[in-house]
Image (cartoon, grey):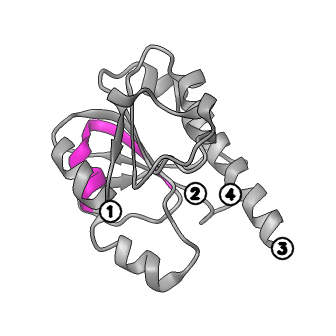
Amino acid sequence: MSRLDSFIHRVTAQRDVLNHIRGRVDEMEGPVLELGLGNGRTFDHLRELFPSKRIIVFDRAVGSHKSSTPDPENMVLGDIRETAQTFIGVDAALVHVDIGTGYDDKDAITLTWLPQLAAGLLKPGGLVASGLELVHPQLEAMPICSSVPVGRYFLYRRIE
C-alpha cells in the first residue's frame, strides 16, 4: 500500500471513529483533549462534532492552518508528555491521540508514557480514541465501528 493510501485509510478511520462516538461523548461532562494538533484538520472536525465542549489541544508548536488553530487559552505548547501531566485529573470526556510516527522504535518510546497519561486525563467512563494501541489496566478496549479495519485505530473506555 502506498503511503498516500495508508494516510487516507488512517484519517478515514479516525473520522469514522470520532463520528461513531459523538453521541456518547456529547452525553458526558468534561472537556475534549486533542494530543497533537498537527495541521489542525482533526481539531477542526472535533469543533464541528462537539460545539458545546471545550477542546484543549497539546503540541510542541503551532503548525496548523490559521482557520484550524485553537484560541490561545486552549492551546498548550511544549512537550506533550510534560505539558499534559498538569491536566491529570481534568476528567476529560474524550482524549484523542494521533501522535504515532510510523517508526516502531519511536512509537515504542511514546507507548512507555502515553497509556498512563491518557488514563489519567479521562473521567471514569471517558473515551480515548488513538492511532496507537494503548495497554493500561484502567483502559478497556471498546468495539470499533465496522468501517475501520482491525488494528487501524483504537477505542478505549476508562474503567473505575
Nearer-N-terminus badge (3/1):
3
Q: Residue furthest top?
A: 52
Nearer-N-terminus badge (3/4):
3
Query: Which residue matches tag 3?
Result: 2
Q: Which mark is residue 114?
A: 1
Mark 4 or 2: in front is 4
Label 4, residues with CA under 10 Å away: few <14, some 14-19, many ≥20? some
Label 3, residues with CA under 10 Å away: few <14, some 14-19, many ≥20? few
SS of the residue under disc 2:
loop
The residues tagged by marks 4 and 1 sit, at their Cα atoms, a distance apart of: 19 Å
Name which quarter of the figure residue 122 lies in.
top left
The residues tagged by marks 3 and 2 sit, at their Cα atoms, a distance apart of: 18 Å
Q: Amino acid at mark 3?
A: Ser
Q: Amino acid at mark 1?
A: Leu
Residue interval drawn in magenta: 116-130
Mark 3 or 2: in front is 3
SS of the residue under disc 3:
loop
Query: Which residue matches tag 4?
Result: 10
Query: Which residue matches tag 2?
Result: 153
Point 40% across, 79% down: residue: 108
Above or below — where is 108 with respect to 36? Answer: below
Q: Amino acid at mark 4?
A: Arg
**Residue 33 percent location from the top left of the image:** 38, 38
